[in-house]
């Protein structure tokens, strides 16, 4: 058994969405002064590796604590789209024979970016046609290797296509060292009732 950590490292230097001021890690007790170590964390609910629940964009959508953990834990497929320059479309997805209840992780050239680079506004994304295709296939969840799943689309069409079908979205994965194929996914958000999204630790087991 091999465990592969696919989580985005959280630090004061990490990439944040559109370079927002989304994180602060502050030392509040040191061993030298207090004989104990303690830090205070201030973070956005959409920092690093995180999960978007339907409530993120839907008025009556489910919050993260209302999503069954089985949705985010179990067999998954990592699909290779590292040849894609801009957007993953329905046409690009169809050859992969995606089936009902698949957990799909999209590996792109985004994974080659450093976890501390400035935000890349030209990241590869899942377009509306691709999102509708995955929703039509009734996948369990969809993950991608950047801090957003879409860009340059009015009204957040890719998010809405998935979240309206109760398909959670995992953003901020790190897949550079992951070969395309079949794995067991474990992606567990913090248990904070009422949130529309939350950071998570994500690992693959081969």
Image: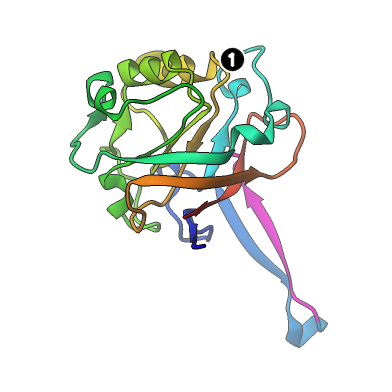
Along the line of sight, which residue is nearer the eye, 108 or 45? 108
**Residue 96: % across, % down:** 29, 29
- Dividing the picture into quadrants, the one containing residue 33 is bottom right
Q: Nearer the viewer, residue 201 or 97?
A: 97
**Vertical comparison of 52 with 48: above or below:** above
Q: Is residue 204 one of those drawn in magenta?
A: no
Is residue 51 rendered to the left or right of residue 124?
Answer: right
Q: Is residue 21 visible?
A: no
Q: Locate residue 176 relative to residue 31 in the image: left or right.
A: left
* Looking at the image, residue 18 lies above or below residue 32: above
The residue lying at 32 percent from left, 32 percent from top is 125
Q: Which residue is mark 1?
A: 58
- At 67% across and 56% down in the image, what residue appears? 41
User: Where residue 31 appears, x then y in whole percent?
Assistant: 75, 83
* Residue at the (46%, 47%) spot, across then down: 183
How many numbered badges does the structure rendering display? 1
Q: Does residue 63 appear anywhere in the picture? A: yes
Across and down, in percent, residue 132 comes to 39, 14
Read off the magenta span: 36-46
Task: Name the element at disc 1.
Answer: loop
Residue lying furthest front in this view? 1
Q: Residue furthest bottom?
A: 32
Magenta stretch containing residue 44, yes or no? yes
For residue 30, side relative to residue 181 (left or right): right
Vertically, is 125 above or below 17?
Answer: above
**Residue 175 falls left or right of residue 24:** left
Near mark 1 (Cα within 10 A), the count class, few <14, some 14-19 or many ≥20, is some
């Amino acid at each position: 058994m091999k465990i592969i950590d696919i989580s985005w490292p959280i630090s004061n230097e990490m990439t944040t969405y559109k370079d927002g001021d989304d994180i602060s890690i502050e030392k509040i007790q040191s061993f030298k002064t207090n004989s104990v170590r303690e830090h205070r964390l201030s973070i956005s609910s959409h920092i690093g590796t995180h999960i978007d629940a339907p409530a993120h964009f839907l008025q009556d959508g489910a919050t993260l604590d209302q999503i069954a953990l089985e949705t985010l834990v179990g067999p998954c497929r990592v699909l290779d789209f590292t040849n894609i320059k801009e957007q993953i479309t329905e046409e690009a997805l169809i050859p992969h024979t995606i089936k009902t209840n698949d957990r799909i992780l999209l590996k792109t050239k985004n994974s080659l970016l450093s976890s501390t680079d400035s935000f890349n506004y030209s990241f590869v994304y899942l377009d509306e046609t691709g999102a509708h295709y995955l929703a039509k296939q009734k996948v369990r969840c969809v993950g991608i290797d950047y801090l957003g799943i879409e860009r340059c689309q009015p009204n957040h069409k890719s998010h809405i296509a998935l979240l309206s079908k109760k398909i959670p979205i995992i953003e901020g994965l790190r897949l550079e060292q992951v070969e395309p194929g079949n794995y067991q996914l474990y992606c567990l958000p913090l248990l904070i009732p009422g949130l529309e999204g939350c950071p998570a630790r994500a690992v693959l087991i081969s």
